[in-house]
Amino acid sequence: MLRRTPRRVAFGLVSLALLAVPTGLSLAQVAAPTPPAPAPAPNPPGTPGMRVSLPFEKYVLSNGLEVILHEDHRTPVVAVNVWYHVGSKDEGPGKNGFAHLFEHVMFQGSRNVGEDQFFRYLERAGASDRNGTTNTDRTNYYETVPSGELGLALWLESDRMGFLLDHANEETFKSQREVVKNERRQNYENAPYGLVRQFVRSALYPSTHPYHRLTIGTPQDLDAATFDDVRAFFKRYYVPNNATLVIAGDFQPAKAKELVAKYFGGLSRGADAKPIRGPVPSPLTKQIRLDVEAGVTLPRIVLSWTTPPHFAPGDAELDVVSDVLASGKSSRLYKRLVYDMQIAQSVTASQESAELGSVFEITVTLQKDKNPDEAFKVVDEELDKLRATAPDAAEVDRAKTRALSGLVFSAERVTGRADLLNNYNRRTGDPGFFEKDLARYEKVSPADVTKALATYLPKDKRVVTFVRPVADAPRAGRLVGGMP
């Protein structure tokens, strides 16, 4: 399963009195032009009701595998979450799409787990939330099982970490390559606006930058991949010293450590994988305009900037900026474009945070036959207003509450907590970063919002993409003007 560099996820209502605004952080998509009623100002973020504890124990096996334990006995389940510190940024020239392709291969069997048996073991055990995902920075594999099945989950993960190549073969590799190519066709090449993201990414980052290409890969590189590439990729990146194992939920630490030692302790340490670490800034020095024709009904504009990495100064502030601009019917861009002028069908804004650097993006999908140049002018007008004058405190508090509620909600289940611990461990070096993560948003002021927009979203260093409907154009889009 491919997962893009994560946006802030849309979350539901959290069962805390403070969190009264049940909407997502940073990604707002709305449609019907109904009158915008300003939401009531929430209680100020940062009260004791927000405190959520994620206690953990971290240790390292002699082979370099990091292990993080988090106990929670409220429900009789346990989550197992393995991060391999490799993503599409690490693939190298001519290997685009390989990290995602390898994720598929990892489910096809290992020395003691037959082909197509991985999920069957888990299904018989009553597992949930079982899958794998790949993004620019990491590949993860996870499952949540009944407490008594922790040993099974650890055995399955250890067998493919240590002995995948005992089972992997040319036929399996080729079949999964076709699966990935079909996924690309469905989700990119044949999807409305499907290739626009690649055009934008190629303009934001030069060909030498690790984020120049999308995680899904290119048909040319996928076709060129060989089974020898699979073996080399596994030996370099799928080693204990390039992975972190999180166990979260209903277990006894002593027993969990015994099982970890049993199944992972004997695996051999690999050479230093040397995954790329950030930040790696983009040298974008001017505004770039892209013109795209697509076989779609509705015009679209996309404004994109390269911004600070995940957890760096400015990252949280830009999340709040995106919320102020486009989260909810009273947000600035929705009110102007969808309700007042009625030229747009939807507006989104997001800070897509990643390890080497992030992307801030505003997307406006217009009503049929409306002029994208007019919408672009309005977006810039609203950005200028926010650069010049700080938003109201209530406006910022609503955005902060949505951010905080999203974080708290993501930690309600052990599956989410396991991934949070892995994320914090990799991105900050501190699995216990949760409280500090909350504090990043709690301290954002109206002045910080204006400063972040002025600092990180300049007019002269961005990519502006205009997508115009053309009947005979590919649905996914074709680039007709601007950088390749």
Image (cartoon, grey):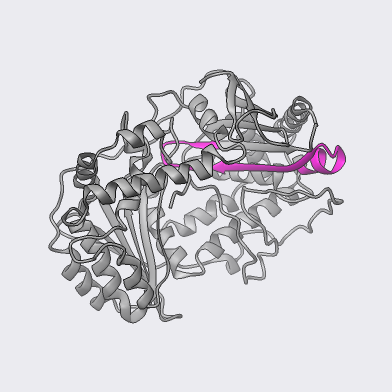
Residue 443 x/y as whole percent: 59, 50
Task: Give the residue displayed 66% in from the left and 64% down from the top.
Answer: 19
For residue 99, which quarter of the picture? Answer: top left
Residue 192 x/y as whole percent: 62, 39
Say left or right for 276 vs 363.
Answer: left
Say left or right for 32 vs 191.
Answer: right
Say left or right for 258 vs 394.
Answer: left
Instruction: Tell me if residue 430 can be seen.
Output: no
Residue 206 x/y as whole percent: 44, 23
Number of labelled discs?
A: 0
Near-viewer residue (466 or 409): 466
Task: Give the residue displayed 79% in from the left and 59% down from the top.
Answer: 40
Question: Is residue 301 within the magenta segment?
Answer: no
Near-viewer residue (203 or 472): 472
- Compared with residue 425, is residue 200 higher up or lower down, i.e. above or below? above
Instruction: Tell me if residue 135 can be seen.
Output: yes
Say left or right for 126 vs 331.
Answer: left
- Compared with residue 3, is residue 290 higher up or lower down, i.e. above or below? above
For residue 371, which quarter of the picture? Answer: top right
Residue 74 x/y as whole percent: 45, 80
Task: Give the residue displayed 34% in from the left and 71% down from the top.
Answer: 120
Q: What residue range appears in magenta?
A: 334-359
Question: Is residue 339 within the magenta segment?
Answer: yes
